[in-house]
Image: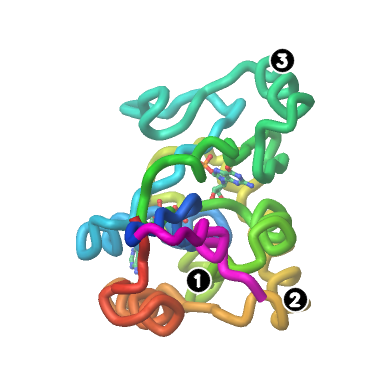
Amino acid sequence: MASPSASATSSSRSSVVSTTPKVLVVTGPSGVGKGTLIRELRRRHPEFALSVSATTRPPREGEEHGRDYYFLTPEQFEQRVNRGEFLEHAEYAGNRYGTPRSELDRPLKALVLEIEIQGARQIQRTLPGALQVFILPPDLDTLRRRLVERGTDSPEVIERRLARAREELDEAEAEAAHFRHCIVNDDLNEAVRELEALAATMWGCNFEGATE
Ligand code: ADP
Ligand code: 5GP
């Protein structure tokens, strides 16, 4: 199956320019530690850029438009859906989220998408060469504790996210064939090492195969 970078244009000139970055999709329930893991991966490997998604959810304290998300009204989001501007989009806990296609046009070596499971499934179809990793919590009590201790969501929102987490874990189990790569985020360092190892297996040590 073609990797996302297989669309690199061949040319008789010596410089071959890839039109698409390597794509790493990190998915899993809210609060499992996707953001934390990706932050650590990017600290170690700055060549991984983070895809900036669009959402209809209101910004949390400290979040910035264009850096953390593109914060859109439901009408703006719908217009972009209709114009086909998203690589994938999904509804999650009462809000809409989507990856702008334009993220793939950035001149990058590697791009990380941190998205929920419905979006990850769509990426399996649209970018079959992307590396997909499902992050699992050690158990549901730990997931609840992480969501509570993160302190970013109201008790009601946390309950909604936990209910969705149970469904996502069931779905991931049922689709084990698709989410072949699962990492349990218990010890953070160990989980980052597993993620690095997967990326190295896919793209070569130190991601030397990554193109500019
Ligand atoms: P997500 O991006 O999946 O919603 P976060 O990265 O925001 O999750 O993590 C949720 C909370 O769990 C944060 O407070 C984070 O510091 C904490 N956390 C993440 N990974 C671990 C870990 N391995 N051990 C303990 N706490 C963790
Ligand atoms: P949060 O509101 O906590 O930032 O994100 C909620 C969920 O939406 C998380 O599981 C996050 O990974 C997911 N998410 C963020 N951006 C996107 C996106 O562009 N597409 C999809 N499908 N999910 C996203």
Report, in whole angstroms, how far the alpha carbon at label 3 lies from the one at label 2.
33 Å
Among the two numbered marks 3 and 2 on one chain, the one whose residue lies closer to the N terminus: 3
Q: Is residue 147 left or right of residue 191?
A: right
Among the two numbered marks 3 and 1 on one chain, the one whose residue lies closer to the N terminus: 3
Residue 194: quarter of image = bottom left
Q: Amino acid at mark 1?
A: Pro
Q: Secondary structure at mark 3?
A: helix
Q: Residue at x 63, y 71 (%)?
A: 2
Q: Give the magenta-colored segment's residue range.
A: 1-13
Residue 92: quarter of image = top right
Q: Is residue 169 left or right of residue 82?
A: left
Residue where numbered disc 2 is placed: 175
Residue 181, how many percent across, how many down? 55, 79
Mark 1 or 2: the one toward you: 2
**Relative to the observer, which residue lies in front, 71 or 157?**
71
Residue where numbered disc 1 is placed: 137
Give residue 17's mark: none
Vertical side of 26 occupied by 66: above or below: above
Q: Residue at x 58, y 20 (%)?
A: 72
Q: Amino acid at mark 3?
A: Glu
Label 1 CB-ligand 1 distance < 8 A: no
Residue where numbered disc 3 is placed: 75
Q: Residue at x 49, y 53 (%)?
A: 20
Q: Is residue 202 left or right of residue 207?
A: right
The image quadrant where one finds the C terminus is bottom left
Residue 19 shown in magenta: no
Residue 90, how many percent across, how many down? 71, 43
- C-beta proximity under 8 Å, tags 3 and 1: no
